[in-house]
Image (cartoon, rainbow, N blue to C red):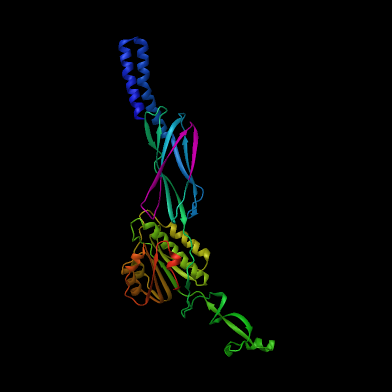
Amino acid sequence: MLITKILFFLLIIVSSFFYILYIPDFALVLLVIFISLPLIMFISALILRFSIKSEILVRDAVTSKNQPSPVQLCITNKSFIPVGKAEANIEYYNVFSNQINSFYIDMPIQPRNTQRITFQIDSKFCGIIKIRNVNIKVYDPMRLFKFRTSKNISAEIAVMPEIHDVSGTVMNIDHVNEESDVFSENKPGDDPSEVFDLREYNPGDKLNRIHWKLSSKKDEFIVKEYSLPVDIPSVIFLDLKCYEDTEYTLPVFDTLIEAFISLSQLMIDNERNHKVVFYNGSKKKFVEKNVSSSEDLAEVTKDIVFSFNDNLFCLPPDKYFKENSVISISSFTFISADISNNVFTHINEYVEADIKNAVIIVKSQESAADIMCGYDDIIITPVIAGRISSSIKDIEL
């Protein structure tokens, strides 16, 4: 574009000398043309600036990790002037990270027409991918002038986390929710308030479990199997406060959320209803969700992912503990990226549970070695970023 301007400037100088030295009328016309062309091009570019509209469309607002998602940039030229060259500056980033990726798209746009350009974006980490058109540079037909238009048009894609297979044991504990009557549909237990099944007597069965009335009709001993409560008060606390502002931020946050849904799924697979607590950035408060099925977990996961904003603000966990005393529960699992001693102090001070777990996400094996606890009743499980299955072994919930 600079070369074109220099060329026009030289042409104006040459035509001026031509007007002075040669035929006045023809040289005057030529000079007027060369002088007026830049003005016409400037007006054309100015008209295009206010005539160009754009939008970013995504086909799937929710996608999976490493799954290419088609994104379409639509640019509409409402004027009668063709655009020989338009340059769109596209940026995209994950809200979990301050690393911004960008690229440029060059295209012509016909008058009174819409140009559609499709590109693909994928991510190997979960989170919200924000895509924005920083601006579109439009040039006049002779590319003498350019203007920026259609600034900060944006769209979002939610990349959902994956569930990992983790080994562990969901313990049968004496604590039960006395206000609930939710029992296992697959396993018998010791709760006499609900009969799970009736079967024939086997040597060693307790006499107080014999169904005498039914046994007298059957002329054989029938034994009652009691039910196994599954609505045992258990809590998973997900600390979404950002403690890592480096190149490890994305892997740590990704592992944090996937460790949570993996442990929650482990409890669901073992028919253990539980409560999930996390800070919702969009609602600006801690929320509690009851999870008893994979469908519940999917909804909670969406709430977590969609609750984030660019500043990743999250209240510290002690704010929740001070306002909500967690007392007399069977198991408490705290998932965080905080390797300081504060997290264990909070759990020890505010939580009363038979089993206390602290699942701490770290960026490396060296960081795992730096974790200090000092409380014998808290079981620490360091999870190296990206290594959930190999890090979580034989956890008790």
Above or below — where is 27 with respect to 301? Answer: above
Asked if residue 347 lies left or right of residue 123, the reply is left
- Residue 301: x %, y % from top left: 47, 61
Chain part drawn in magenta: 91-119
Q: Quadrant of residue 253?
A: bottom left
Where is residue 90? Give x, y as percent.
41, 43
What count of labels does the image hold? Answer: 0
The answer to which quarter of the image holds residue 384 is bottom left
Answer left or right for 160 relative to 312. Answer: right
Pick the quarter of the image with the N terminus. top left
Q: In which quarter of the image is residue 286?
A: bottom left
**Magenta run includes residue 244:** no
Say which residue appears at 46% left-offset and 33% top-offset.
Answer: 108
In the rendered image of this protein, does residue 269 appear above or below residue 110?
Answer: below
Q: Nearer the viewer, residue 169 or 300?
A: 169
**x and y, in percent, of residue 129 in the image:** 43, 51
Q: In this view, does 43 lie above or below 179?
A: above
Q: Does the magenta stretch include residue 110?
A: yes
In the foreground, 270 or 156: 270
**Quadrant that contains the C terminus:** bottom left
Give the main secondary structure of the magenta stretch.
strand
Picture residue at 60% right of the left edge, 84% below the top? 224
- Position of residue 10 measured from the top left corner of the image (x, y, whole percent): 32, 21
* Residue for point 51% across, 50% down: 60
